[in-house]
Structures are given as C-alpha cells and as structure tokens.
Amino acid sequence: MPRVESVSASAFGDALEKALRSESGASLLLVDLDNLVLLNEKAGRDSGDKAIAAAARTLANRAKAERWTFGRVGGDEFALMAPGLSLEAAFLRAERVRAEVVAALHKAVSGKYGTTATIGVANAPRDAKTAEQLMRKADLALYAAKEQGGNTVGLPPAEDMVLRSSYYSRAQLGRLRSLGDRLKKKEAVLLREALDDLLRKYERT
C-alpha cells in the first residue's frame, strides 16, 4: 500500500499556528467518515481499514494538489488546513473534497453500508482567533452536519444556537434516539417539531 503523506498532530498544530499568524488567516476542514462502525460490524474490520485508507489517500492527494496541510486527528477523522482560503471558498472546496472521498469509499468498500463523509469547515479570523478555537469551531460545524444526517458539509452554528447535548439528559437523548429510529426521522427534525408545537401552544394563550 502506498505511503499516505500526513503530518503528525503536533506538526499539524504548528502549521495551523503559523498560518493564523499571517494576515490572510486559514480555513480548517475536519473530515469524519459516516457509518464506519456499521461497516466494521457488518463487513469486518478489514473493510473498515480499507475505507480509512481510501479516504486518507484521497485527502492526501487533494492536500498535495492544493498545497494544504493534511493530518489525521483520530481513528476515522482527518484535518485539512488551507492557508489564505476564505470561508466561502473553503465551503465550496469542501463539498468537492466530500464528493471525492465518497467516490473513493464506494470503490474501496460496498456502498450498501452507507459509508460516506461529513466535513466541518471553520475559518480564522472569521470564526476564531487561535488554533484551539478554530479546531473547536470546525468540530462544532462537523457535529452540526452530523446532526442533519451526515454526508454533507457544515459551518459553525451561530452564537445564539445551543447544541442539544448541553441541556438534555442522557436518558432524554436515549429516548429521543429510540423515537427517531422508530419513526425513521432524524433527531434534529423531531426536536424542531416539538419546539414548533410548544410555541404554538403558548402563542394561543
């Protein structure tokens, strides 16, 4: 298997810090594979490893072509740092990257397991001032995209939006997940329906 050219976590952090010190800033793309657990369970760990390797090769090639920095930040989570790229441009590039990764995944493993990719995008100085803040904002963008079903590109939520995990108990989230599975609906959709019902109830009083 050809060597995938990713930098270490510390080297990636150093590159990000250096980019943020420049006037043009940088955009960060966090890439996470969807349904990898299902793939491992149904098709075996070898298939999961093939999916990770295919995604890594695709991202490394894209980073090399764009002169970005590529790093692996988790088991199936990767990061691309694009110096001088605005948020709008990064969002459009991220969608192209997502499509490339999904195509590579479907060549490497069966598409019936729904193995796709979700990307969170954030920009400094628009969304953050430090590397740590930028990683957090990109992670929030990734989380928001995952909440909408994955296989898409997400941006950081507005400051007035609160992630549901901050004000619901584990028991409530478990019941919500079970309800979503039973009704074949996303949890975010059910929460919006419930909020609309609540607002209508009290607006009539």
Image (cartoon, rainbow, N blue to C red):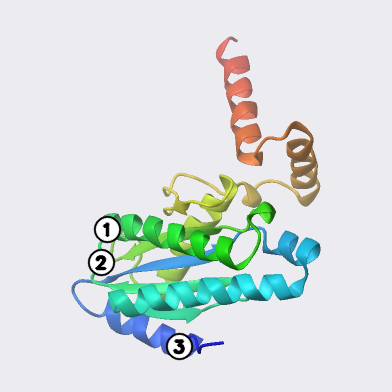
Residue 32: percent from left, percent from top: 55, 64
Residue at left 59%, top 31%? 192
Q: Are marks 2 and 3 in contact (CB under 8 Å)?
A: no
Task: Tell me whether the residue at label 2 lies in contact with that at label 1, contact meaning CB atoms closer than 8 angstroms.
Answer: yes
Asked if residue 6 is positioned above or below residue 189 in the image, the reply reads below
Location of residue 67 with respect to 42 vertically, above or below? below
* Image quadrant containing the C terminus: top right
Disc nearer the start of the sequence (2/3): 3
The residue pinned by badge 3 equals 7
* Label 1 neighbour load within 10 Å: few <14, some 14-19, many 20+: few
Q: Relative to the observer, which residue lies in front, 118 or 49? A: 49
Where is residue 20? Give x, y as percent. Answer: 29, 77
Q: Secondary structure at mark 1?
A: helix
Foreground of the two, 16 or 91: 91
Amino acid carrying label 1: it is Ala
Please, what secondary structure does the residue beneath circle 2 have?
Answer: loop
Disc 3, SS? loop
Residue at (51%, 76%) from the top-left corner? 56
**Looking at the rendering, which quadrant does residue 130 occupy?**
bottom left
Q: Is residue 106 left or right of residue 97?
A: right
Q: What's the distance in space between the residues labelled 2 and 3, CA to CA?
A: 20 Å
Task: Please identify the quadrant where the N terminus is shown.
Answer: bottom right
Image check: 202 left or right of 178? left
Mark 3 crowdedness (10 Å alpha carbons): few <14, some 14-19, many ≥20: some
Mark 2 → mark 1, Cα distance in angstroms: 6 Å
Q: Name the mark on residue 89.
A: 1
Instruction: Name the residue carrying label 2.
Output: 85
Q: Residue furthest left?
A: 23
